[in-house]
Every structure is written in C-alpha cells, then in structure tokens.
Amino acid sequence: KPSNDPITIGQVELLARQKLPSQVYDYYASGADDQRVKDSNTADFDEVLRDVSCVDTSVNILGHRYSLPIGIAPSAMQRLASPGGEKDVAKAASSMGLNLTLSSNSTTSLEDVIKTLHESNGLKSGPRFWFQIYLPSNLKLSIPLIRRAEAAGYQALVLTVDSPVLGSRINERQTPLVLPKGIELVNIAKSHGPSPGKPSFNRILADARTKQQYDEGLREAEGKANNASLTWDSTIKFLRQTTNMKIILKGIMAPEDAELAIKHGVDAIIVSNHGGRQLDCVPSTIKALPEIAAAVKGKVPIIFDGGIRHGSDILKALALGADFVLVGRPILWGLAFKGTEGVQTVMNILERELSRTMALAGTAKIQDIDASFLRRSVEGRL
Ligand code: FNR
C-alpha cells in the first residue's frame, strides 16, 4: 500500500497549510512587502548546478560534533503551530542530536526548552543549543535574560542584527496576528516587557480593537525589543562583559560587515536576511554568500540560512563557503504537520536528500565539499 507520509519539504508545507488557521500560515510563510527576497532565497538555488553524495554527514561547529550540518533556526511563537511548540521542536533536536537556536520571542521558557536535552542525552554528550536575542535600546534590560540563558546551559548567544526596526509585513499589518489566551512571549515578558503597572504587550495587542490601537501597541513593544542604535564597539564589548557564552552575529549580508564582526572578535557569523522578512530588496543569501566567504577566509565559522528546502541546497551552500546551515520555515511546517514527529520527518528528508546528493556528486565527507563541485549554468549565472 503506498504511504501517505510526506517525502519533500514542499509536501510537509502543504499538509501544514491545511492544518493551520490562514492567519498563522500567513505569519509563518510571508516575507516583507512584495516577497521578492523571500522568493529569491529559494529560487536562486535553482541557478546553481546540482551535483553529488553520501556517507559521513557529520560536522564540527564551535567545538561540538553534529551528525548533520543542519541546525534549527530561531523562529518566534512556535506554539501557534502546535500546542507543544518549542518543546516539540527541542525534543526532535535532542532525539536526533541536532543543534537548535531558540528565539527570545519563544512561547515556551528557555529553561523548559533546554530541559529536553537533560531528559534525553544529558548536557554533556548531547548537541548544544543556542539562544537568540534582540538587544533593547537600554542594553542593561537584557542582562537578566542573558544570564538566564547562560545559567540554563545554552552554549552561544545569537545576536540578531538585521532588525533595527521590524520589516514591513503587509499581511500582518492587514490582519494583525493576535496571540490566543495562554500563549505568551514568556522569555521577554519578564526581562524587557512593559513598564510596571501596564498591561503586557500581548494583552495590549490582543485587546486592540482598531488597527491604530494595534499599531501603537506594536510600536511600543518594538521600542523595547528592537534597537536602532546598536554600534559595533558598545555591543560586542557589552556582551563579552555580560556573558561567557560564545557570541554569534545573525543577519550578516555584506563582506564589510563580516570583516567588522571578525575584527570585533565574534565567534561565528550567520549569513541571513531573516528569511526575507526584513528588507525586500537585498540579495538572496545564496547570492550574498560567496563574497562573504571570500572576506572571512576561514577565520570564523560561517553559518548560513535562507531558502534551504532540499539536501542539494545544503551542498550548494557548503560549496559556496558555508560551514553549517540553519532551516527556518520547514521546521514550522513539520511542527504544524505532526509535532515532534513532523520536525523529525523534515530533518530526515533533508538528511536523506543531502546524503544522496553527496553520493551522486561523489563525495563522502562534508569537509571535502568546495567550489569545485559547482558549475556555472549555461546563462553564465551562478
Ligand atoms: C523568523 N526568523 C527569526 N530570526 C530571529 O533571529 N529571531 C526570531 O524571532 C525569528 N522569528 C521568525 C519567525 C518566523 C515565522 C520566520 C519564518 C522566521 C528568521 C529565521 O531565524 C531564519 O533566518 C529564516 O527563517 C531562514 O529562512 P527559511 O529557512 O525560513 O527560508
């Protein structure tokens, strides 16, 4: 009897779409404005010739070995996809030995998420989890949150630097996403939530009856969460003084910024345009990657995200200079489809596709993948 299990990420997305309220599907799926960057993130992979194969897909990143060069990107509000939310995703990561970055805008506390690691592998032998933050204008407000992440056992702090202000998300503005009762941004509510005596931002947004009220609430929440005045000197110094965790910058799209990140002593960078959700006129990440890799020259690990939907996309990103990749939306589709099992399905699909691509391209080790695996397409494009 033929199996109904999804065998591609596209099929998992279709199943997730059937299950999710359209507002939630739109929130997860959309990019900014006309979706140009979001669409080019995936489409530009088709301009890189496919090639390669299998055997050992394991890699080392920041001192730890993972069975796959694929981590889980931070994405907000996962309990909108399934009741288990972030915990279900973390269980999948723990059970498969995968790296995970938790969004500070998660709907499960950072302590509860890392508990899944203690429960399965134990923190010593298992994978490492990282914690993502945005820094508020008043840097000091973030200290309790950073200390909590360190105390809980997160290995690295991922500072997202592509969001001085929130991108323009047309569908979110037209149909505001209201968090259902009982679902809250539990991490940041404690640290840089609303001023004492004021209702929580979730409450303000949920109670907003007009678009104007909603926009005002959002602006106030953003003022606390997003910071348009971060500078290289103050930020990295502040983080180093505050924590011993590794520091990773997420949202690097230019070689000059990669060089500055290295100069200021970060431990790794993530080439990312936030899944096309911020500025709708930047290059796709796969097109931005080669120049950045040339500037980095192997001095720090390059992590890459944006548009990865096939195992072959991973090989292409590695061939163009990435050391590790993250996937965002496919995890949300898997979660909506079938909780922990759905996320495992997504990762198994990518693992099988990556192994097969490596085998077909004739390489047995991730470390051997380099630019020689790529050919320009007939049109002379990448
Ligand atoms: C994100 N992303 C994100 N990034 C971040 O640093 N903090 C966050 O809270 C979020 N939240 C978030 C929510 C949703 C719904 C999406 C789709 C994305 C960006 C994410 O980490 C990653 O950069 C992209 O999702 C990668 O692109 P793909 O794999 O989704 O194409």
Image (tube, rainbow, N blue to C red):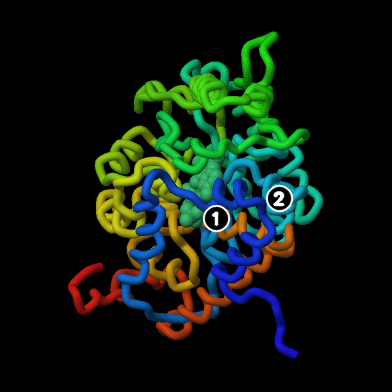
Dividing the picture into quadrants, the one containing residue 350 is bottom right
Which one is in front in this view, the residue at disc 2 or the one at disc 1? 1
Disc 2, SS: loop
Residue 171 spot, x, y in % from top left = 49, 43
Q: Which residue is mark 1?
A: 329
Label of residue 286 in the image: none
Looking at numbered disc 1 in the image, what kind of residue is underneath it?
Arg
Residue 222 spot, x, y in % from top left = 50, 25
Note whether ligand 1 is within 8 Å of mark 1: yes
Crowding at label 2, few (<14), some or many (≥20) Cα neighbours within 10 Å? few
Residue lying farthest left? 380
Please state, as top left, top right, bottom left or bottom right, where the C terminus lies in the image: bottom left
> Above or below — where is 170 with respect to 207?
below
Looking at numbered disc 2 in the image, what kind of residue is underneath it?
Lys
Residue lying farthest front? 210
Question: Is residue 330 visible to us here?
Answer: yes
> Above or below — where is 143 with respect to 256?
above
Q: Which residue is mark 2?
A: 124
Q: In the rendered view, does 98 fall on the left or right side of 328? A: right
- Could you tell me which residue is drawn at 42 percent across and 51 percent down? 301
Q: In the rendered view, does 280 fall on the left or right side of 145? A: left
Residue lying farthest top? 197
Task: Return the residue nearer the eye: 162 or 269.
Answer: 162
Dividing the picture into quadrants, the one containing residue 79 is top right
Crowding at label 1, few (<14), some or many (≥20) Cα neighbours within 10 Å? many
Residue 157 spot, x, y in % from top left = 54, 37
Residue 249 spot, x, y in % from top left = 43, 39
Task: Return the residue nearer the eye: 23 or 105.
Answer: 23
